[in-house]
Image (cartoon, coloured by chain):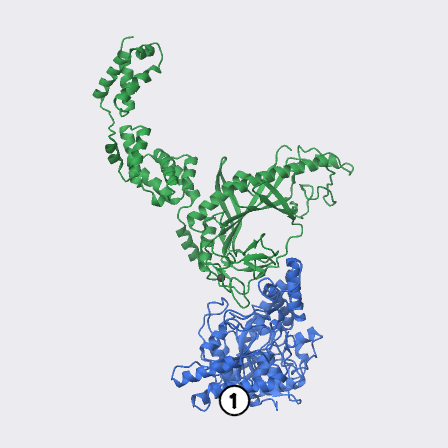
Chain colours: A blue, B green
């Protein structure tokens, strides 16, 4: 039963074949069974989830109207505030933080009658690409337990892939939904900046952070996005635009369809003039992406080589913009108002130093220092302000691309899931893991990763599709065209 | 030291009169129990986001337009990063390089006349909380009250164009008047809704300075040759903080100017002089124009800075810290808020709603009612409602000077005694106007008129009060002539004295008439008749 999609589980409940309680118990069992090895969850809401499920069943029995996600368990990355429930952002410094409010997305989920089954592991403050930076535990990839699930939403991606839940919420600042979705063989979508309210999301890089769905297939992802997207007056950057019913049009293909393939993401097939960054691409992934493009061609799409000339600077720009914002966003964790206060200290400055020193992990400290440096007088012009200028150029690259293409397609990540510990000693190598995903955050555009194959070793491969701002519907429909022709999304990891 | 120029610039923070805070819905009411007016947003809880108060921006816009500022069509928010326990996010949302307004001015009235003080910029920002240091607590802990955190503040930075402590006082008073009139702020310094930091230094002309000694050969001669009219020594800029009253501002600046002058003189008397300013000496804090040119455009290089606290009790400033290494606030654009655009239609609406501002009002009052600058200034300072009252008094009587006297003296003291606002004045302005008209028509003297005024406060009209008091002015010539003749007959000694040239002696005769009429004889008529009759009386 746990291998079913969310949509199938909804249908079975509607048909009276399954109850919310039985579904929830099944997923809780699965978590109990596999999480000791996977470590996808930081907190599991056993009692509360079951109780909630029974309440939904009662509601259904009484013939009361039910929400779009009624009786469906969902896992949420532990960076979204849950009222009265510990929310750690994967950090020691928020070990005992119990928010007095729900994040907007949590409210939406509750209103849709979804059941919060647990909070998932993540890189501390969403800073990382492997979920190894969690202060609490390392999450394992369900397809290969010695490998990472990607990150920072690795817990959410692993939980869906391992069928511990059918739906999960992640956040994406530089690829943190899409890259783990690719590593775990599932669908993961980062909506346009401003599509989903960030209220209640513990900020990392405020101008880049977005919340999005992780699911087995596109229908589930579309359904979840439908529920969480939309205006919220508590987030000034959240746009007031109608939310289309993404599930409704999902099966309608886009015709005609022009797909832009950036030479910077995928070397030209002739082999000559391989794009600089594309050169680091794993050949097995390259083959899978070309196969996916063939699928689209067979459906009548036009494949158009394009260039995103400023994309080679995306990683550099990202690590200035995101860290600058992070250095300011994380300043509040000082042991005065929030954050674990050091036990012994001499005076205020010492207290702040000791609290932050003990509370933050290495990567967080590294990024705070980077960001502080980039904003410091004497350096701000050369680093932060220059990065903002290049960020605009990156956005313009995409504007130009979308003037002639419906979507831009390439790999989600340059490699399949890497081994746990493989890149922890080399932050720069780790940063390169987000090379194809980061530009979308800088440009504020939507992006989705869908399963498009496996390596010979059996590791999932993700196809990334990017669209113009607020074209989530088109993106989902284009992705669905591929999904209908393939069955990669139906595979489940051999956990037994 | 002979003379010096005092250079003063003021940074004023005013709290806007909004019901709620700048970025959340919490109350801005003063004096609530600690931390009761807080929410997750103003406490900066993880995951919360600010949402700008339209009302606060509106009020700030009104103030800036009234201060003749140019309004930016596009303005953004910035984070000012610094660690302090009263700042829960450890950054303050403020405005850095694109403030919503800049380049304005404020006209002030000084003893020397009207002066226009330039305004560099006015921007919006959120207030911090308040530290409560409990000296009685056993532990050395400090407490923080976050009620004030997030309160909207308008920071108004003047150009360093204020030249005396008196002008600084006038500037703050004028600003307070303007902002109160607009309903932008109540500007209560005691409650912290108007706070002021003052930057002050001196420009001391080189000419006239005695140079004592110098270890550099020929330096004194060179210095003296530099001492043209334009050359001056600039003392370090001191930023005086903790100015809680307007009087305090004036006193602190007076003290600080004198202190800087004395310090420079002491240094000159004791000092070793280095012209290039590069070597450490007692003079390292001073800049000499045009000798120590540090900037390529030939203007004076940055003057060293320090902050000082004003101690109201001792009447002294205490230097707190040097500002040689300016704090690095690592400003960055606030990603959680959208930039604000202001279009021409909005600006026109704001302008239309401003009404008459004090400076324009003073000019009009002088022109329309032939008032002196002083009278117009005093009237204007009482606020728009008071001026409107004054104008309603003038209407029935046509005598602005008298209307001004009555409103500013009698009426104002009545209001003060009864602690009433002009809006609650018990005396309708038409009635006061009628009283002035009666006085002019009947010649009622001031003392009697005040009695009438007193009765009018109980709701009587001027005529009713006069009737009730039985004040009937005797102006009938026949009746008065009779009285004058009787007075002359009854005072032969006074008449004799008058005839001998003692003009004053006539007063005694006049006094007789006034006594007979209970002071109600029309003085001008009595005077005229008395003089005529005395002429006719044989000596
Ligand atoms: Zn609040």
User: Picture quarter containing residue A447?
Assistant: bottom right
Q: How many marks?
A: 1
Position above or below: B499 against B82: above
Residue projecting furthest to the top: B539
Residue projecting furthest to the left: B478
Q: Nearer the viewer, residue B6 or A394?
A: B6
Position above or below: A350 against A145: above
User: Picture quarter containing residue B470?
Assistant: top left
Report if residue B102 is visible in the image: yes
The residue that label 1 is drawn on is A4
Circle 1: is it few (<14), some (14-19), or many (20+) Cα within 10 Å? some
Estimate the x, y position of residue B494 in percent, counting from the top left. 32, 12
Estimate the x, y position of residue B345 in percent, counting from the top left. 42, 57
User: Picture quarter containing residue B484?
Assistant: top left
**Is the C-beta of the residue carrying label 1 under 8 Å from the nearest atom of ligand 1?**
no
Position above or below: A134 against B393: below
Report if residue A249 is visible in the image: no
The quadrant in which the C terminus of chain B is found is top left
| Residue at 66%, 33% in the rendered image | B207
| Residue at 70%, 79% in the rendered image | A422
Estimate the x, y position of residue B99 in percent, counting from the top left. 53, 55
Estimate the x, y position of residue B352 in percent, counting from the top left. 39, 52
The quadrant in which the N terminus of chain B is found is top right
Q: Nearer the viewer, residue B500 or B465?
A: B465
Position above or below: A393 against B458: below
**Chain letter of the residue carrying label 1:** A
- What kind of element bears circle 1? loop
Q: Nearer the viewer, residue A119 or A456?
A: A119
């Amino acid at each position: 039963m746990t291998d079913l999609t969310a949509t199938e589980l909804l249908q079975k409940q509607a048909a009276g074949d399954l109850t919310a309680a039985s579904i929830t118990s099944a997923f809780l069992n699965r978590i109990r069974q596999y999480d000791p090895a996977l470590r996808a969850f930081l907190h599991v809401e056993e009692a509360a989830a079951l109780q909630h499920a029974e309440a939904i069943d009662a509601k259904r029995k009484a013939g009361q109207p039910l929400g779009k996600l009624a009786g469906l368990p969902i896992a949420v990355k532990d960076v979204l505030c849950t009222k009265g429930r510990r929310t750690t952002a994967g950090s020691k410094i928020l070990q005992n933080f119990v928010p007095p409010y729900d994040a907007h997305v949590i409210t939406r989920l509750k209103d849709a009658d979804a059941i919060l089954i647990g909070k998932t592991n993540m890189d501390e403050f969403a800073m990382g690409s492997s979920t190894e930076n969690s202060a609490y535990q390392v999450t394992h990839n369900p397809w290969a337990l010695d490998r990472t699930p990607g990150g920072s939403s690795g817990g959410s991606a692993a939980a869906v892939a391992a069928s511990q839940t059918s739906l999960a919420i992640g956040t994406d600042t530089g690829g943190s939904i899409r890259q783990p979705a690719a590593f775990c063989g599932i669908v993961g979508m980062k909506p346009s900046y401003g599509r989903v309210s960030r209220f209640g999301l513990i900020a990392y890089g405020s101008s880049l952070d977005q919340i999005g769905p992780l699911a087995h297939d596109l229908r589930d992802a579309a359904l979840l996005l439908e529920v969480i997207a939309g205006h919220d007056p508590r987030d000034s950057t959240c746009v007031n635009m109608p939310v289309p019913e993404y599930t409704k049009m999902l099966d309608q293909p886009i015709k005609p369809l022009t797909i832009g393939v950036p030479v910077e993401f995928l070397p030209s097939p002739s082999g000559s003039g391989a794009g600089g960054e594309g050169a680091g691409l794993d050949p097995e992934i390259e083959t899978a992406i070309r196969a996916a493009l063939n699928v689209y061609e067979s459906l009548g799409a036009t494949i158009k080589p394009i260039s995103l000339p400023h994309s080679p600077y995306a990683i550099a720009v990202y690590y200035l913009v995101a860290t600058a914002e992070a250095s300011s966003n994380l300043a509040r964790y000082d042991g005065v108002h929030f954050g674990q206060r050091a036990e012994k200290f001499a005076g205020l400055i010492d207290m702040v130093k000791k609290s932050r020193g003990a509370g933050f992990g290495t990567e967080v400290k590294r990024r705070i220092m980077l960001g502080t440096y980039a904003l410091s007088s004497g350096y701000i012009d050369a680093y932060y302000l220059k990065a903002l200028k290049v960020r605009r150029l990156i956005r313009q690259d995409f504007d130009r691309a979308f003037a002639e293409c419906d979507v831009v397609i390439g790999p989600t990540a340059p490699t399949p899931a890497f081994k746990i510990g493989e890149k922890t000693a080399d932050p720069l190598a780790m940063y390169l893991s987000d090379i194809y995903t980061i530009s979308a955050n800088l440009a504020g555009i939507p992006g989705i990763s869908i399963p498009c194959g496996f390596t010979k070793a059996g590791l999932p491969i993700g196809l990334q599709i990017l669209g113009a701002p607020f074209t989530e519907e088109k993106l989902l429909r284009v992705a669905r065209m591929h999904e209908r022709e393939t069955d990669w999304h139906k595979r489940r990891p051999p956990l037994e | 030291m002979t003379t010096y120029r005092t250079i003063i610039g003021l940074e004023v923070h005013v709290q806007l009169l909004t019901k709620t805070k700048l970025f959340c819905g919490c109350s801005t009411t003063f004096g609530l129990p600690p931390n009761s007016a807080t929410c997750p947003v103003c406490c900066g809880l993880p995951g919360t986001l600010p949402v700008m108060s339209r009302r606060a921006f509106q009020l700030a816009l009104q103030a800036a337009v009234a201060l003749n500022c140019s309004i930016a069509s596009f303005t953004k928010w910035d984070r000012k990063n610094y660690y302090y326990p009263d700042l829960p996010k450890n950054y303050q949302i403020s405005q850095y390089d694109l403030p919503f307004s800049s380049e304005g001015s404020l006209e002030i009235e000084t003893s020397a006349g009207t002066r226009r003080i330039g305004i560099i910029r006015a921007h919006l920002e959120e207030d911090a909380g308040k530290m409560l240091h409990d000296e009685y607590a056993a532990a050395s802990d400090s407490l923080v009250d976050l009620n004030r955190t997030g309160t909207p503040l308008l920071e108004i930075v003047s150009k360093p164009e204020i030249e005396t402590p008196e002008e600084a006082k006038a500037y703050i008073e004028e600003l307070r008047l303007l902002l109160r009139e607009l309903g932008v702020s109540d500007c209560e310094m005691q409650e912290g809704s108007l706070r002021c930091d003052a930057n002050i230094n001196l420009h001391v002309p080189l000419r006239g300075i005695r140079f004592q000694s110098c270890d550099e050969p020929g330096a004194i001669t060179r210095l003296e040759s530099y001492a043209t009219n334009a050359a001056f020594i600039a003392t370090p800029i001191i930023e005086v903080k903790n100015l809680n009253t307007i009087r305090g501002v004036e006193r602190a600046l007076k003290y600080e100017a004198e202190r800087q002058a004395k310090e420079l003189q002491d240094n000159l008397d004791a000092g070793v002089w280095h012209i290039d300013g590069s070597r450490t000496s007692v003079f390292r804090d001073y800049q000499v124009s045009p000798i120590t040119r540090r900037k390529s455009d030939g203007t004076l290089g940055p003057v060293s800075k320090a902050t000082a606290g004003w101690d109201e009790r001792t009447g002294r400033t205490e230097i707190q810290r040097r500002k040689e290494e300016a704090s690095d606030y690592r400003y960055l654009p606030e990603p959680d808020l959208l930039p604000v655009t202001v279009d021409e239609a909005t600006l026109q609406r704001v302008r239309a709603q401003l009404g008459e501002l004090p400076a324009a009002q003073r000019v009009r009052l002088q022109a329309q009612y032939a008032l002196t600058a002083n009278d117009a200034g005093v009237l204007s300072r009482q606020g728009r409602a008071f001026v409107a009252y004054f104008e309603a008094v003038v209407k029935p009587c046509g005598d602005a000077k008298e209307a001004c006297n009555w409103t500013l003296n009698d009426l104002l003291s009545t209001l003060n005694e009864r602690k009433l606002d002009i809006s609650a004045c018990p005396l309708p302005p038409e009635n006061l106007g009628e009283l002035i008209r009666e006085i002019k028509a009947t010649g009622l003297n001031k003392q009697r008129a005040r009695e009438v005024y007193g009765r009018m406060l109980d709701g009587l009209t001027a005529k009713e009060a006069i009737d009730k008091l039985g004040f009937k002015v005797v102006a009938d010539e026949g009746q008065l002539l009779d009285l004058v003749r009787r007075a002359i007959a009854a005072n032969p000694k006074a008449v004799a004295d008058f005839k001998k040239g003692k003009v004053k002696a006539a007063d005694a005769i006049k006094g007789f008439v006034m006594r007979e009429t209970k002071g109600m004889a029309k003085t001008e008529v009595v005077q005229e008749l008395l003089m005529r009759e005395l002429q006719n009386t044989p000596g």
